[in-house]
Amino acid sequence: MSPADLDLRQFAVLGLVAEASRLALDYFNKRESLGITMKGAQDWLTVADGAVEAFLRERLTVLFPSDAVIGEEGGGEAADAVWIIDPIDGTANFAHGDRNWCISIGLLLDGAPEIGIVSAPALDEVYVGRRGRGATLNGEPIKVSGQADIAHSCIEIGWSTRIPHADYLATVQGTLAAGASVRRVGSGTLGICHVAVGRTDGYAEHHINAWDVAAAMAIAAEAGADLNDFFAGDGIRTGNPILCCTPGLSAELERITGIVCRHKGH
């Protein structure tokens, strides 16, 4: 795919995400319209999830018919060029009126994150990353914190129902024992973006889905983060662990989490 083809996709999808953000924010501001249901324990679903994904999927199919699309709600199959969509990441936050949620859309080329766009409309924030072109927040360049002392760091540890509670608690305990502070915002996508912009120093989760990380990984890599090889094996279809951190902490966080960084930030 040529640089011009990628330029077209980046700017077209920025426009689509702006429209999708207005749609999602309208649902968020009208609590009675959410139609909240549960897909499983602590696995929230709202009408907005389906509406935002349907909008993005339909527009992408019209604009770029040769590109594949995978969405959290509607599924899909991988291809050489595939858009991976999370219509609302942080749905539990969304359903509870917490502003920490976002729309995530990432383009993978040959299995590698190429373009990432993450919009958090309730926070008025848009993150963009493009391989080799840098990362921005609301148009301004961003980079990781550069923190190298775990005892001065803030690490987010994501939680998944697919991982035994004891394993999650062991990771939290190990991180605290190393001297770090620990937080959990409730959106894996924003967790990785927060590392990219330097609000936190690392994000780790022992199982997360491709739609939660595809866009954010492109952003974080361009902001200088170290990342593990999430898309190894069957990561697109079944998910994998994720570790994203400022480079000075990668060795310590690898030791604590057991997740090994393969891709070094730019």
Image: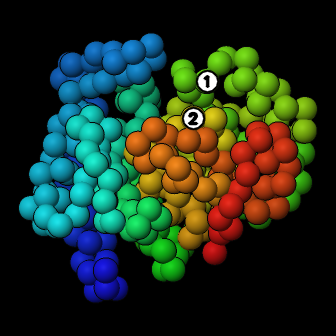
- What amino acid is found at the position of numbered circle 2 in the picture? His
Left or right of residue 143: residue 161: left
Foreground residue among 132 and 20: 132
Image location of residue 71, percent across then percent down: 29, 43
Q: Can residue 44 be seen in the rendering of this structure?
A: yes
Image location of residue 97, percent across then percent down: 39, 26
Foreground residue among 61 and 192: 61
The coloring applied to the image is rainbow
Bin the neighbour count of mark 2 within 10 Å (Cα to Cα): few under 14, some 14-19, many 20 and up.
some
Give the image quarter of residue 144: bottom right
Up-down relation of residue 52 to residue 111 (above or below): above
Q: Residue at x 49, y 40 (%)?
A: 239
- C-alpha distance separating marks 1 and 2: 7 Å
Up-down relation of residue 2 to residue 243 (above or below): below
Foreground residue among 233 and 84: 233
Residue carrying label 1: 163
Residue carrying label 2: 207
Up-down relation of residue 13 to residue 97 (above or below): below
Q: Residue at x 76, y 39 (%)?
A: 257
Image location of residue 93, percent across then percent down: 44, 28
Foreground residue among 32 and 14: 14
* Numbered-mark total: 2
Q: Secondary structure at mark 2?
A: strand
**What residue occupies the far left of the structure in this picture?**
62
- What amino acid is found at the position of numbered circle 1 in the picture? Ile
Left or right of residue 179: residue 11: left
